[in-house]
Amino acid sequence: MNGWCGRLLAVDLSSGKIWVESLKQELLQAYLGGRGLGVRLLRDSYHLDPFASEIPLVFAVGPLCGTPAPTAARLAVVSRSPLTGTIYDCSAGGRFAWRLKAAGFDAVRISGQSTSPKVLAITPQGGELLPATELWGQPIAETVQALSGRGSVAAIGPAGENRVLFGNIMMGEGNAVGRGGLGAVMGAKQLKAITVDGDRRYDVADRPRFDQARKDIMRLFRASPVIFGDLGIAEYGTPALVDLMAQRRMAPTENFRKTVFSRSDKYSGPAIRQAYQPKKDGCYGCPIQCKKSTREGVPLPEYETVSHFGALNGVDDLRSIVQSNTICNQMGMDTISAAVTLATWGELRGTFLRADELAPLLRDIAFRRGDGDLLDLGSARLAAQKGQPNLSMSVKGLELPAYDPRGAYGMALAYCTSNRGGCHLRAYPISHEILRKPVATDRFSFAGKARIIKIAEDTNATIDSLVACKFSFFGASLEEYGELLSATTGCEYDPQHLKSIGERIYLTERFYNQQNGFTAAADQLPERFFVEPGSSGEGIEVPPIDRQRFAEEMDKYYRMRGLTPEGRFADADFLERQP
Amino acid sequence: MKRQLEKYAGKLIADGGADAASMAILAKDDQILELGSPELLQLGRAVLERLNVVSLVIADPSLPLLDTLFGRLSPQASEIVPLDTETRTFLHDIPVVRRDQFSAEHPERLVELLGQRKGILVEGVGIMTTGSVTVELGYINYCSIYHALFIKILLDFLQGNPPTLNEIQSLLPLWHQLQVPIPERVDDLRGAGLGEHEDILHAMEIAGRRTVELHLVDSFFGNISCRVGSRQYISQTGASLDELSGCIDIVADDNSSTAGITASSELIAHRAIYQQTGAAAILHGHPKFSVILSLLCEETDCRIKDCWKECERVRSLCGTPIVAGEVGAGGIAKKVPPVIGETGTAIVYGHGVFATGSNDFVRPLRALIRLENDCRREYLRLLQGRVVDSSSSVLLAQKQV
């Protein structure tokens, strides 16, 4: 079998047992890997509480991992989110995925709960549980350092240990399994870290075809100004978007009360370059290298992070923003959710935090002490507990990233239709509404957007299952990645087929959510966006979103998905018909 | 969405690619919206409802290019490989479908191939393309394939089997068109200075639109820029040159802002040209005959396989240098600037033409027109040398009455 190992490492932390299971080829072909495989593996347990002992935490790589396919050395981690209650997956780069595949596994399924802190050490021979009492409480860098020599590391920090609802799993190279709190799920299992090492190499089924597809992809990367342009992400990282979002007047500011922050040039891509002379960094096997780090190797913040610790909190101090990013990385905590929660806190208090107040409060959140013991719950629970739920800028409990929905109506829809809550990456309409890829759409129009979002969600579910980086798709498409996959596995995959797999994955997630109590009422933006305008100016009008048009397009979306007007499955047996 | 259908149906006709009777455009919202010939719409519906895309364009080019292609293809051929850089980059190979492989009742083969590629060539029907995001994208893919088809056939007349009398006769409107030079409609650009912000935008919009109107580029390709002080005004990536309003980025030389991340993929090349030549304006189009003749290489013992990327030679066409180089960061920025300074014009192998000006867009536009007129004449001269019968020769030289 090319492309897949056909093996899953199963770990029961309660009993300490570790064993290898076979994965059927038909299942792998139907779900690919990554997000799709992880979602499928949760079929019998999606209803469990995220902190229940039996809930699985799945790490899954994709069929392209281990090959020279561009940006494909990634994995997805899947479980149920303690922050949102939805099924949850997150894609991450680094070297961990590549090493896991090199150890001979497509996936690791971890269930149960240890009675004391453990490290799971994976090698081609299987897995071993090591005591980790001394590592418990340690920040990420120290944990990774302590485990050096065991290959790549995925670890939680104090935030995950303390079940902060937006605790991350951090890859040793600085990449995050972020947003939905899967670090807290790992913490509840008392699993401090996973190490993985392996040296198995993989061949592809059709090398000339693979090489041609790879060449085509690289040509498309070079043709994409967003990727390899003078002002693109390879040069500036994602903070290249700071200036663009300011110009488009859709940079969330002061907890989304405004959409322009006049001092955003203090933390823009060029400002970061001037202040830090960053070096290019990135995931294993990635030609783009969009991550930027200091000369000392400390990861610098992404766009979402600079904008949210910046504009969203009214802070223009770059050093403070970078420090906040570093603390979140060290504590193992999601930067978007943390920053939005701080901004919610600011609005609730009537005054936003000063730059020098960010760092201590972030540490308090990670250790759940003082006000941090309330903020660790995320913005939705915080605002609800304070009696002002409308001040949480979240969907399904997931804090919104740094694209104001009043400035991009596809984004407004996509936040709501996303199965994991307010996420920009599920349909990624910023690609066409702002970055003009593969073609520009009118960002202030709902016309046709439901269909676009639906197709993009299917496409991106596939991408997350391959597992490839979404930035690749600022240049390439499923056409080229389908070629890579066909050449790798020897099975034929074209874009249409791949999108049908993505559709299956998306619908499966939605079905899980429905069974867990989610209805169309959860597919809703915060009220603010329908009643308050953004910051108009310089010829750009940013009105509140038209509620009726929004609702009409959501209705269309449900019809396109084959759902009832209430956003539900008409067919209760949906899962039984899936492979 | 209906407005989009009407807009791009109009463009298909205006750009000369298709006529109303042999065209259909369909789009999927929560239901299928459509415009065009009833017969094609029937086929289009059957195809579109089976595909997970937004739009479908079906059109048979007014020039009988598809008939010509299928007449030249071997019966075993399942695809054509485009030679022009844009199509080669964005669409790869283009599948072909014979008329006995499908029907409106059984469109499975069409669906299968459109599930694999952005567009296909269908015997007896025309070019079929899909758009995964918008109607516009289906139209863009149509334009790309039309462009690729045109170049491939016209180049094949020079490099492959010479055209038959029948082929020459069927393409008579084209030969007539080539007898009439592209008019040098540039005078109204004179004085459209590069001073005030509004004047600059206006000048770029006029020059861009004119470039499209004169068929020196299909509307979605090409790019335009000018340099004013330490800033560059440049069309955005994927912007239609005939619809530049709101689609021009301003990029500072010192990269003090990255808002220009949406600028044309050729920003790198434009910057390098400005740095090395001192020019103030650049126009980049894809005039068809300049592209076709750039692909004619007489090297016989060359080891290079990927001519678009790897060729280091500087050849010449009608006194204009030709260099290789792929889009964006793919080499144009390295290879064009060193050669464009002398003549103010450079051709990129299989791609298009860059032309510079020192004050406005008069010189760049005129340079594109003159080069294309020269290339048209040269093409006809070369073709005359290829045709074997006197009737063909007469038809090629005939002017429209």
Image (tube, coloured by chain):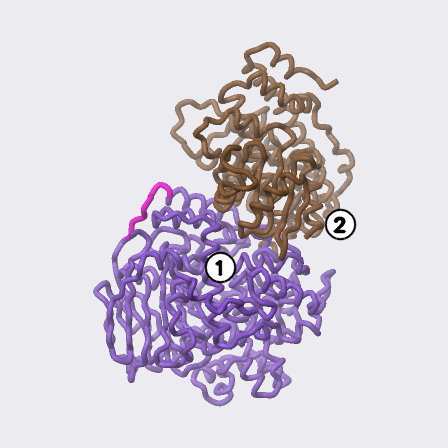
Chain letter corresponding to the colour purple? A
Q: Which residue is mark 1?
A: A503
Which residue does the image show at 53% across and 21% down from the upper left? Answer: B158
Q: Residue at x 55, y 17 (%)?
A: B164
Q: Quadrant of the C terminus of chain B?
A: top right
- Where on the picture, by quarter, is residue B62? top right
Q: Amino acid at mark 1?
A: Glu
Q: Amino acid at mark 2?
A: Glu
Instruction: Write the start and end of the magenta stretch as one range.
Output: A202-209
Left or right of residue A129: residue B253 = right
- Give the main secondary structure, helix, strand or loop, of the magenta stretch: loop
Check disc 2 and report the residue beneath it: B196
In front of the other: A69 or B193? A69
Q: Residue at x 40, y 83 (%)?
A: A162
For label 1, count other residues whose C-alpha is less than 10 Å away and answer few (under 14), some (14-19) or many (20+).
many
Q: Nearer the viewer, residue B324 or A197?
A: A197
Image location of residue A574, percent across then percent down = 46, 66
